[in-house]
Amino acid sequence: MAPTRSLLLVHAHPDDETINNGATMAKYAAEGVKVTLVTCTRGEEGEVLVSELAHLASTQNDLLGEHREKELELAMKELGVTDFRFLGSPEKKWRDSGMMGTPPNERPDVFWQADLTEAALELVKVIREVKPQVLVTYDEFGGYGHPDNIQSNLVAMKAAELAADPQVGVGEPWTISKIYWNTMPKSVIQQGIDKMKEIGSDFFGVTNADDLPFAKPDEVATTLIDGLPFAEAKMNAMKAHETQITLDGPFFALSNNIGLSVWGNEYYTLVKGEPAGSRDENGRETDLFAGIA
């Protein structure tokens, strides 16, 4: 029998997974792939965009993390993902770090301050349990420079290395065949920006994709997952993250004005393994598991 296909995603905060990989997660879950999401923090320092829930903020009652756990559960239900967990144990888990240069970032219990090897060994336990052939996380800049996103990349890459080493930790070593980093091509973002301009709006206050830190050169994207049949599930999962994503914000504006394809198509950069399988018209892979025996 062929081994069970297993996909592991490592993200920094609840909602990052849906924005970056929601359609991909739903697609593979529907195909019977074992999809595991590891979220490294509970997003305690996130901005609360719902006025009636403002009391949850870290500057008030500091209950946002608990609320975002519930949002994540609802989002995963929309995507059909049943295995989602937070990094670490009840005794050892990490808090949202906030942005660089802010007081929360200096707290000793935040993820940015975590010992890299200690955090990676927590993820090694998951890797050896679920045995993923494919790992998805951020690039080395964390997409847009958030310290937790950067740390998630460092931890994921370190854990992939350590998990394959029989001299490290407990359990049978496991080698991940392919590793991908999330990416968003500039041309795709510019298309959305231009459409927003046509209706007299903007996308995060910019009119040029070059001004967005997460916009990457098109050639960086080696892989495109067509998740359009699951774009609606992704949008519903976005709605579940009510404190972080507003219905009148840029994500839904893009969907409403250029169609669901802007969120159904999800792009990746292959950083470990060889591209394989069928390609689209731009020579990009169309399956994260292509070439895996």
Image: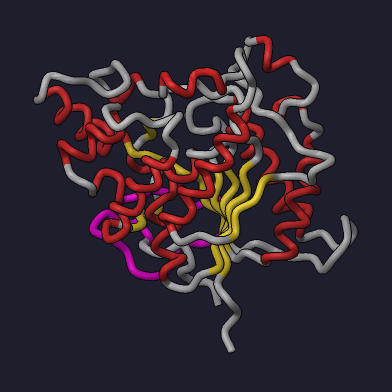
**Quadrant occupied by the N terminus:** bottom right
Q: Which residues are magenta?
A: 265-285
**Quadrant occupied by the C terminus:** bottom right
Which residue occupies 63% across, 10% down? 101
Residue 102 placement: quadrant? top right
In front: 184, or 205?
205
Q: Position of residue 257 (x, y in %)?
A: 15, 36
Which residue occupies 12% across, 19% down? 200
Q: Residue furthest front?
A: 52
Residue 24 placement: quadrant? bottom left
Q: Main secondary structure of the magenta part?
A: loop
Q: Position of residue 258 (x, y in %)?
A: 16, 40
In front: 208, or 234?
234
268 is within the stretch colored magenta:
yes
53 is within the stretch colored magenta:
no
Q: Is any atom of residue 17 visible in this view?
A: yes
Which residue occupies 28% across, 52% down? 232
Q: Is residue 2 above or below residue 178?
A: below
Q: Is any atom of residue 117 visible in this view?
A: no
